[in-house]
Image: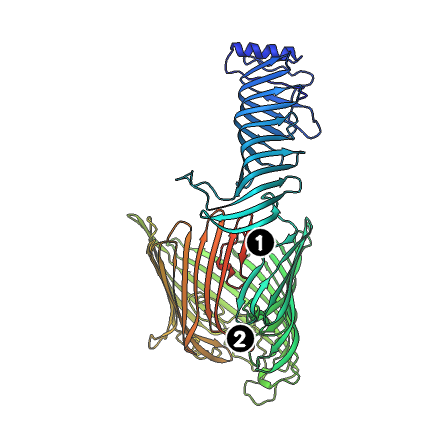
Amino acid sequence: MGVSGFSSRFARKTRGGLIAATVLLAFGLTPAHADAPAQKPPNAAKPASPDDQKETLITAQQMHADQNTGIVTATGRVEIAHNGYILHADKVIYNQKTDIMHAEGHVALLMLSGEVEFANEQEITGDMKQAFARNIGIIFPDGSRMTARVGQRYDERYSVGDKANYTACNVCKENPDNPPLWDLRAKQIVHDNVEHDLYYHDATVDFAGLPIFYTPYMSGPDPTVERRQGLLTPSPGYNPNIGAFVRVPYYFDIAPNIDAEIAPTFSTTDKAQFAGEYRERWANADLKLDGSFTHADLISDTGMDEGQQWRGHLFGTFLYDVDNVWRAGSNINFTSDKSYLLRYQIASADELTNRVYVEGLRGRDYFVANSYYFEDLRPGEQPAQPLVLPETHFSAYGEPGQSLGGRWSLDGGTLVTMRDNNALDESQQGPDTRRLSLSGGWERRFVSDTGLVSTLSGLLRSDTYWADNVINPNGSGNNFDNVLLERPFAQANLLTGYPMGRQGDGYQQMVEPLVAFTAAPAAKTDPHTPNEDSQDIEFDETNLFSPNRFTGTDLIEGGNRLTYGMRHSVIADDGMRVEMFGGASYDFSKNDQFPGLSGLRDQTSDYVGRIDFIPTNWLSMNYGARLDHDTLSPQRQDALLSVGAPIFRPYLRYISAYETETTGIIDQDKEATAGFDSHFLKYWGLHADYTQAFAPEPGPRNADLTLSYTDECFIFGVTAQHNQISRADVSSGTSVVFHFYLRNVGGLHTDSAAAPNFANQFRQY
């Protein structure tokens, strides 16, 4: 066995210890006694390494050597470490002449690749590179395991199990003798721990004790492989748009920092679609590209048959960290036509945004330069989308208490937009805008001796516009060109609150009345001013106290107004929680900049508020609303009720809101969603939901039903979906998708937008 270092541990001085010492001396070695520190001989044992092939460390309670037969026997908690291998056994008999060890009693051999072999008895060569055993078990580093009637290992590479079984399932704690949920039994399983492959001959997959699949030969990576080039699990399915299909992905492991995947989809309607993904990562950057293409029939959103066309999409992200302050990146999202993404269930977005940017952050200072291109996927004729080149923004903040006891701020930015208005109707056209904005602010917080908390802030701002083709709101057809204007603005705001709290028996209560006064000159909308980023407005409790309740920069809320509200919360030690907030505002001059039914057009605003009520862990309710200031009729509602335990928890959500734009009222949307979640068994889950629209177009919208099972070694899920999406070559209807996966072996799943409903920790990508 080539022993050059030896250590013997003793529980106490015994005759066995003397025998061990004699054995050591007979082999020319120095013993280490239990009652004194070990003396380090010239060739003392050290941690095994591949560069020192002959060094061996042995520990045992008793040792015996027969010089005539060349047999060394070690008993009692034997541990032998050699060249990275570690052998544990109750007893080891080593024959120097044959260089064979016989280990017996709780034999465990840890191998270089991390697997552990278990057996009652095992024959092992002195260098531990070859072994033989009956009734052997192997545990892989991820916890999966293989058992075999007869097992042997040779060439320090191959482990062969005859009449073998493999499974990734844990042993049942309640009934450890029961078979696992699934296992793969084979006439022979060969493990190559150099290439990290598993080969199965005459293999059958048993599930719940029943055979469900047979193959004469199968191979795949062992559990230690994180990624491997090769064919991934095919995905068959049915889509009402492309018919029956099968997706066949192939993965390329190009380099440690580069990989790719191609995934052709063959269908009965569109014949073939080719998709792919490419990923690369550097020390300070990463890139991801995802795209597809096909040559298939195209029906435009007007219903016209365009014949065979090249169709596809490209999504991509890139991020480059220049240094600790600056970084640059891009988000690319492109598709050939409005219905392609829906037809292949790639995405359901109504608009795609392409962005290229550079940004920097140093302390409290920030700068970003963006360029945008938008692709509108909504059916029908839509307004011309702008090309933004560029949009910049910077902000800087001073130290707290630095300026008159407060802090200063400086913000600004530029915006340049361009549109192709040629051959477009006036209702679809838009302006070409150049805008420069600068603003300076100051803010200070005061806390009085009586507990009043006040925040005083001020703002000076200037916006300069140079624009063409600004749409005339009078609808005369004569749009404004060569618009050049400047808009100065100043505003002061004082927000005061008086928080009051108390500690009760098992609960905490807080009440805080709030009032704010905002002073500014009236800001009437100039018809010459282009409106690029203040197209919509939604007034609710989240922006009640905002100094400007318009979105974006192009519209400003001026005038003098008073805003008031109340915050109240009760939180109990047992988890019960009630939170309420509500308020309104009064504008001292009517502000007709806001659209009708926005809740802000009259001097007195609508009332906005929200209530969150969670009295126990089996009941949760929240309700947000905007009520008309005269009639108290709901103008916006968002209610959610959830009740029950994890075994069955139904919920109901209702949404009603006026969808408004600063150009006018669009519609009132009303819809309700009812559903439930149920974890009725340890590994089983059931989810269902149904959405019904009441306005503007009454009718069902979609319905989903998902049944899933997830444990440590197996995933199963099936989802039935029904949707009412119908446009161009995208049809409404019902689809059923499923997911079936055996950990480390593989499975099947349909490729669908519903796939995220299933757990994905074992999915192949």
- Tell whether 4 sits left or right of 37: right
Closer-to-camera residue (116/352): 116
Quarter of image, res 584: bottom left
Secondary element type, mark 2: loop
Residue type of the residue flagged with mark 1: Gln
Determine crowd level at label 2: few under 14, some 14-19, many 20+ residues with C-alpha closer than 10 A: some
Q: From the top left corner, tell me how far across and down residue 34 is, in percent.
A: 54, 14
Identify the mark at residue 526; answer none if there is no mark.
none
Q: Residues within 10 Å of mark 1 (few under 14, many from 20)?
A: some
**In the figure, is residue 421 to the left or right of 762?**
right
Q: Are marks 1 and 2 in contact (CB under 8 Å)?
A: no
Q: Which mark is residue 764?
A: 1
Q: Which image quadrant: the C terminus?
A: bottom right
The answer to whether residue 139 is seen in the rendering is yes
Q: Residue at x 46, y 43 (%)?
A: 180
The image quarter containing residue 266 is bottom right
Q: Is residue 146 above or below residue 469?
A: above
Q: Residue at x 71, y 29 (%)?
A: 51
Does 400 appear above or below 633? above
Residue denoted by label 2: 535
